[in-house]
Image (cartoon, rainbow, N blue to C red):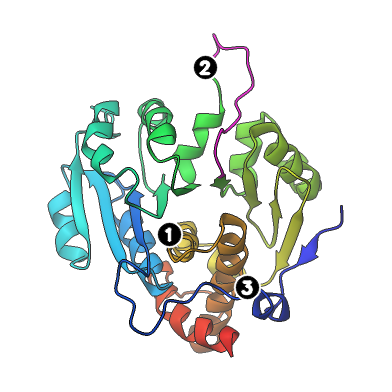
Amino acid sequence: MDATDITPSLLRSWPLPMPQPDGDKEVRGHLLIVAGSAEMPGAILLAATAALRAGAGKLTLATGASVAAQVAIAMPEARVIGLDETAQGGFRHEARHQLAPLAGKVDAVLVGPGMCDTAACCELMRHLLPLFAGSRLILDARAMQVVRQPAHLRSQFSFKQPVLLTPHAGELAQLMDLSKDAVLADPHGCAMEAAQRWNAIVALKGALTVIAMPDGTKWTHAGGNIGLAISGSGDTLAGIITGLAARGASLEQACAWGIALHALAGEQLALRFGILGYLAREIPAEIPALLRHLAA
């Protein structure tokens, strides 16, 4: 199946859900972000800011108890939950009990940016998948490692619910036990193989981004600039996608729009600062105007 190019005209023909003028923050969507760590508390802030700039209405953050207070001060728009941490800086799987009251109450969930302790992250993810089966779920960074089954399990991992994974080439290579060069040589084939293997939507990020669905549907996007290859850029992209999903967009629509908005934000920043030197924290502020422009 041929891939569809993500262009402004395509996006305009695929409009995002819009709240009624008299809608409140609940109508605009409630999202949960489980992310960050003592070493990387900024990741959850980048994702959270991007999600709100994408138009989501209500925000709950769950991060390490050791940094929760600082995150709450830095992000006054959010409710912040401090999760019990492991000695390696991850979240204990018992943290699911702190998140359980949100099951069925959040429209979209992002897990992964800035998290530490891969083993703990995967254990927690195995509990969160059924807990948030009714929400649009986006997995980034270490949270994607859940697809790698423990050695004693011979069965292949497969999601039982719609999930979006957002790996770059290096991450997908590790998840599929391939070389990075192999992924770069065949991004279409690798993204589709991963989508069908795990029953997930896979967005293989790069200068050419490929979005693949288990049914064989594919989209591609080429744009942005090298300035987007910077620490925190992926966190902002994940946040944009999650914010759009919280508003009611399907995972594939939120992903296609999010990738395009992220790239266009990079182009706008390059006009002001140059191709190199702008910061990931500056990306979210570009999103509202771009949303207005693409809706025109």
* Label whose residue precedes the other's in the sequence (3 or 1): 3
Q: CA distance from mark 1 to mark 2?
A: 29 Å
Q: Quadrant of the C terminus?
A: bottom right
Sequence order check, earlier mark of 1 and 2: 2
List x then y, in percent, for residue 183. Answer: 73, 43
What's the residue at 21%, 37% (across, down)? 98
Whole-percent x, y for residue 219 in the image: 74, 60
The amino acid pointed to by label 3 is Gly
Specify whether residue 224 is in view: yes
Q: Position of residue 79 (x, y in %)?
A: 19, 57
Query: 64 above or below 272?
Result: above
Nearer the viewer's eye, disc 1 or disc 2? 2
- Residues under labels 2 and 3: Cα distance? 37 Å
- Give the amino acid at mark 1: Gly
Q: Which quadrant of the structure image shows residue 47?
A: bottom left
Residue 21, image quadrant: bottom left
Q: Which residue is mark 3?
A: 224
Disc 3 versus disc 1: distance between alpha carbons? Answer: 15 Å
Residue 38 at least partly seen:
no
Q: Magenta residues?
A: 151-162
**Residue nearer the viewer, 201 or 222:** 201
Residue matched to label 2: 150
Vertical arrangement, residue 194 with respect to residue 240, above or below: above
